[in-house]
Amino acid sequence: MPHCRRAHLIVRKLISEHPDKMRIVHHHLPLDASCNPFVQRTLRGHEKSCELALVAICAGKQGRFFEVNDYIFQNAEEIRAKAIGAREIAQTLELDVEKLVDCMSQACTKEELRRDIEKAESLHIEGTPAFVINGKVYYGRIPQEVLVQTETAPPTL
C-alpha cells in the first residue's frame, strides 16, 4: 500500500491542477486473499484492503468517496497498526455509520468490488498501483511523456 499511497497523492494533485483535462475513475484491486480470488496470500501491507475497499465504495454512496479514500491512504499505517475498522473511520469522518456498515454487508456492494477485481484480471493487472490511460496499462509511475500528452490533450467528455 505504500506505493499506492504515493501514487494516489500524485494523481490527486494532477487532477486538482488539471480538472478540465483529466479525470480519475477509481477501481479497487485489494491484494487481499479474503476477497480477491486471484491472490493466493495477502501481501504484507495489504491487510484489511478488502474491508477498506468496501468502506470507500459505501462512502461513495454517501457522496464522500474521495474524502474517505484520501483518509484511508493518508492513514493506512495507523489503520492497520491500531486495527481501526469501518465504524471508527465512519465516525471520524462523520459519515452515517449505520448506513455505511449496512452497505458493506450488502451483496450488491460485494458484487461491485468483485467486478473491479475481475476487471483488473481481464486487463492482466497483477499489482498495484496500476493506471489505465487511453487503454494502456502503466504500473507504479505514469511515464512523464504520457503525463505531458495527457496535459496537452484537448478536454474530452
Image: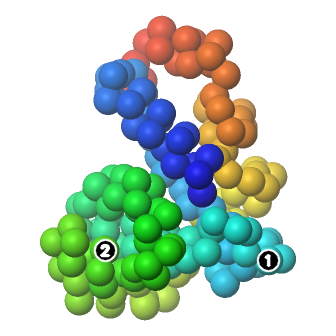
Quadrant location of the C terminus?
top left
Along the line of sight, the residue nearer the viewer: 67 or 63:
67
Numbered mark located on residue 89 in the image: 2
| Left or right, residue 54 beside residue 133 | left
Residue 145 percent across, percent down from the top left: 64, 13
Numbered mark located on residue 41 in the image: 1
At horizontal 32% and vertical 29% (from top left) the residue drawn is 16
At horizontal 63% and vertical 28% (from top left) the residue drawn is 142
Query: Can you say whether 15 is above or below 50 in the image?
Result: above
| Left or right, residue 40 beside residue 140 | right
Q: How far apart are marks 2 and 1 (CA)?
A: 26 Å
Q: Residues within 10 Å of mark 2 (few under 14, many from 20)?
A: some
Residue 19 percent across, percent down from the top left: 32, 27
- Residues marked 2 and 1 touching at CB (< 8 Å): no
Q: What residue type is labelled 2?
A: Ile
Along the line of sight, the residue nearer the viewer: 80 or 91:
80
Q: What element carries label 2?
A: helix
Residue 56 percent across, percent down from the top left: 40, 66
Quadrant location of the N terminus?
bottom right
Q: Is mark 1 on a helix, strand or loop?
A: loop
Quarter location, residue 93:
bottom left
Q: Earlier in the sequence, mark 2 or mark 1?
A: 1
Along the line of sight, the residue nearer the viewer: 70 or 79:
79
At horizontal 63% and vertical 40% (from top left) the residue drawn is 131
Any part of residue 74 in sight: yes
Query: Can you say whether 54 is above or below 71 in the image?
Result: below
Q: What residue type is labelled 1?
A: Arg
